[in-house]
Image: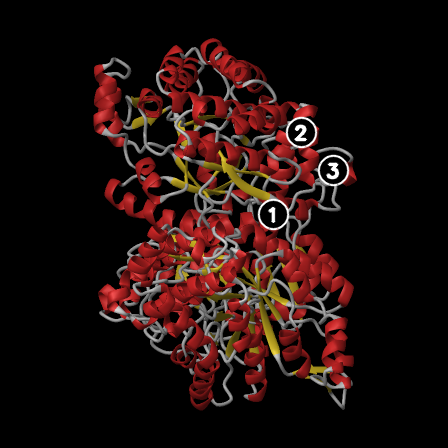
Amino acid sequence: APYRPEPVKAAAAVRALPPMPALAALGGATIVAAADAAAVRKALLDPKAPLVVEGPGVGAVQVHPVPLGSLGLGSAAFMQHYGVQYPLYTGAMAKGIASADLVIAAGQRGMLASFGAGGLPIGKVTAGLDKIQAALGSKPFAVNLIHSPFDDLLEERNVDLFLSRGVTVVEASAFMKLTPHVVRYRVVGLSRDAATGRTVCKNSIIFKVSRTELADMALRPPPADMVARLLREGKVTAEQAALAATVPMCDDVTVEADSGGHTDNRPLQVLLPVIIARRDAVKLETGVHVRVGAGGGIGCPEAAAAAFAMGADFVVTGTINQLARQSGTCDTVREQLSKATYSDVVMAPAADMFESGVKLQVLKKGTMFPSRALKLYELFLAYPSLDAIPADVRQRLEKTVFRKPIDTVWQETVDFTLNQLKDPEKIKRAEADPKGKMALIFRWYLGLSSGWANAGVTDRAMDFQVWCGPAIGSFNDFVRGTYLDPAVANAYHDVHEANMQLLRGACVLRRIEQLKAHAGVRAAVDAAALAPYRPEPVKAAAAVRALPPMPALAALGGATIVAAADAAAVRKALLDPKAPLVVEGPGVGAVQVHPVPLGSLGLGSAAFMQHYGVQYPLYTGAMAKGIASADLVIAAGQRGMLASFGAGGLPIGKVTAGLDKIQAALGSKPFAVNLIHSPFDDLLEERNVDLFLSRGVTVVEASAFMKLTPHVVRYRVVGLSRDAATGRTVCKNSIIFKVSRTELADMALRPPPADMVARLLREGKVTAEQAALAATVPMCDDVTVEADSGGHTDNRPLQVLLPVIIARRDAVKLETGVHVRVGAGGGIGCPEAAAAAFAMGADFVVTGTINQLARQSGTCDTVREQLSKATYSDVVMAPAADMFESGVKLQVLKKGTMFPSRALKLYELFLAYPSLDAIPADVRQRLEKTVFRKPIDTVWQETVDFTLNQLKDPEKIKRAEADPKGKMALIFRWYLGLSSGWANAGVTDRAMDFQVWCGPAIGSFNDFVRGTYLDPAVANAYHDVHEANMQLLRGACVLRRIEQLKAHAGVRAAVDAAALAPYRPEP
């Protein structure tokens, strides 16, 4: 069963695995010396071949083959079910972008591909099926069935077509609820096997979901009332209706994270474990197992490896296939995509669900479509009909957007609906509903813009709608300079080739993980041999060679030897990551599972631990305003865990008091302090640096920096000196830089800016020696890649951003010769997320939101209770106090508080009016009554008092008195600033104004601890910060142990799946 938290009785020292005796050459094995980096690398790149690495202090370490079917526990079953060679399918991109040619090119080489039928008229879908079925014959393929609540007839007719043409695999997407049509497709394919009596399900469905409630409907049988209705209507037989209760709605669920097109932008490292847990819970009720895969952001081997590490049975690609030469788009779009980065995407209104305000993710670079589509939606919300839109606005629409009279657009809409969609009822409804008619006309633009992009209509290039997710950035990094790079090959890639390379890379990374698990190998093998995979042509597709059983080994020192058939014993042994394990059995031989010490989780984990003098490759990130309290820092630090004090947003006096407490308790033990960049509080930043230097703070976590400042540079440079014996630079002041963009990583990875250092030297703030040494060090020792976190965040997908920034780090290292470690934060709420981060190359991980639940955090029990009941979707973005004027937002809890909506209203007023006096009187009165709860003049006086007496910054008040808009901002920031304080202090009568910084990781953490000793409902107490974080890492180690066993086909067959289940906290 999944692992649940239980207390760990005693912290034992990590036992090093003794060298294995030299093995007799295994059948087909490559034996290489650990010191021969080139030979090790070459051998690792053949995932199908057994490998033995030998060397002094290493002995003989075996690396199992990693066949594609071993990547996920359900990968082989997925491949068998669909009759394909890969645990992957290429997802449907609507309007034929996932074209018939693309489906054929993939299918002819054993890869499942889904035809993008969504949004196409029936005639084009029929033509696509004609072409696919003629080319593929009996080879498998899928067809997309997209839910369009405003095109019910089209959905019904697509199902009619699929059934009549014998389509046996449908990829169902964008369903917010089940419909009779998708249920009919499933149920019509049911029959009873005459010999066994079992239900046979001819029509397979892969359900794309992005929410737990949608997964729930897909994992359960078809709704009985809907099946009964279909039976009454004669659309299913009595036998089919009876059998419907015995099967789930689908065979596979694809968890869709931050993808192109329709997406909820959910973080994969949170959503995938949550939905897998939901699948497991439903399985306990129904007894039926549904495979779960991962899509969204899968653009490189690291992302695929991370998905499999989290428990995915298969992966799905999308955006990257639009670049393939077989896709149904034009070369202009392909060229745009080939130059795009992860940040060149944005959300824009969707054509198929325009009226509901649904958005999809598109390319923003090189097109005006996103802004024009948004303008149409704003007009739709603002006016009841086209006639109500001001004449000048209508004229601009006709000139720049439609490029023809609106009446002509309407007539074209009528013709298309009647002749192509065959839906006269839709026109009748629109004629009777002016707002509905306006929607159809606006959808004319939204619908055609993707067609213009696909067809390459040159004079409409600025209106191209290109569905695109951030994975395009990591894919372009992955292929850059290789034979798949269009700039190198002078051609766009083949769809099968690119996807095969992603999976091959994932297999190579899994092989590397096996070597990394052995401390002796990590020390003996050059890091270059374990570098990220880049595409290389595969000369010939050889059959996967099964690893022969190993001869029985002599008992290793301290090893536990268990029978493969004894699932309980295997599970128990796996749960001790520090102990060597040998699993024996018929057809298995003796398979060794190396210990997984914490220092082996990432290539730089041991170095991180050594640098900071800690026991874990993790730190607890700063939550500002003292939520990451002195007590929390002390509780972690006393048990060997680095923690960062949340000094951001606190007045100097409180930061000083916090340092007093921490330094008195920890002495020489390490801790960090947060330095948050506040462009509107420059003096506070400077005074914090003064304090840190005077108090001997040697580790700073720098966050929210959009640019380097003299203050953070001074902190770094003042700590430099030259070692008299070696002449090397000694850097006393360590910085961990939090970044969420490549350009921010770039400034952190390079030396301090020479002009800024020179200025500090002129001002006497650094010495000449320190200034000279500045060019020899980077701005930081570690970079934390911050994905979808609580508080300040860009909501970037970790599986895209982390590989991109690691690649950037490696490129800068080639220039500077200096290596900076890279870690991962944002969404780290369960062992699967931590394991995924390490699988992608992270050296350490950072937790945040989950620590606010800890009993030592600087918040109140009311907030803790709210957090303990929150799911991944109970968060929203709201204006930030520290960068209010810039429109910066942070992620907060939305459940149980009015703060997000009230804060947004304040920002809207700030944008709309030049001063407080310009705000209408009735609006001011409502603010004073419901938000401020006191006169605005009183709020201003309190703001002045705080700024003068606490911040010691009279200049800020002078500027505000001279700038009415600046004064308004300070008054609004009074509410934004105090609301987090009310939450921390538990001010009861302000409970509806609590500002609680929170990321979606809270949902996966609550799932992880539910029902265990870390669950506050079980323990009747909130968890200890060290205990919860230790359990995350322990779980990651156990998952890494499980990966070693999964790499051996014989073990996968011999060991019960329960022994390899996800980890939950145990002692």
Q: Residue 342 carries which label?
A: 1
> How far apart are the alpha carbons under marks 3 and 2?
21 Å
Q: Can residue 384 be seen in this view?
A: yes
Query: Where residue 445 sits in the image (x, y, percent)?
Result: 54, 25
Residue closest to the eye, 1012 or 96: 96
Res 463 → quadrant? top right
Q: Earlier in the sequence, mark 1 or mark 2?
A: 1
| Disc 3, SS | helix
**Is disc 1 surrounded by few (<14), some (14 to 19) or many (20+) residues within 10 Å?**
many
The residue at which mark 3 appears reads as 486
Q: Which mark is residue 231?
A: none
User: What amino acid does circle 1 point to?
Assistant: Tyr
* Residue at image point 71% right, 40% down: 484
Quadrant for the C terminus, please: bottom left
**Is disc 2 surrounded by few (<14), some (14 to 19) or many (20+) residues within 10 Å?**
some
Residue closest to the eye, 507 or 351: 351
Q: Is residue 138 left or right of residue 497?
A: left
* Residue at image point 33% right, 65% down: 935
Q: Earlier in the sequence, mark 3 or mark 1?
A: 1
User: What amino acid does circle 2 point to?
Assistant: Ala
Q: Can residue 1044 be seen in this view?
A: no
Query: Where residue 248 sits in the image (x, y, percent)?
Result: 31, 33
The answer to whether the residue labelled 3 contacts the one labelled 2, judged by CB atoms less than 8 Å apart, is: no
* Residue at image point 43% right, 76% down: 946
User: What amino acid does circle 3 point to?
Assistant: Pro
The answer to whether the residue labelled 1 contacts the one labelled 2, judged by CB atoms less than 8 Å apart, is: no
The residue at which mark 2 appears reads as 461
Q: Is residue 691 left or right of residue 540?
A: left
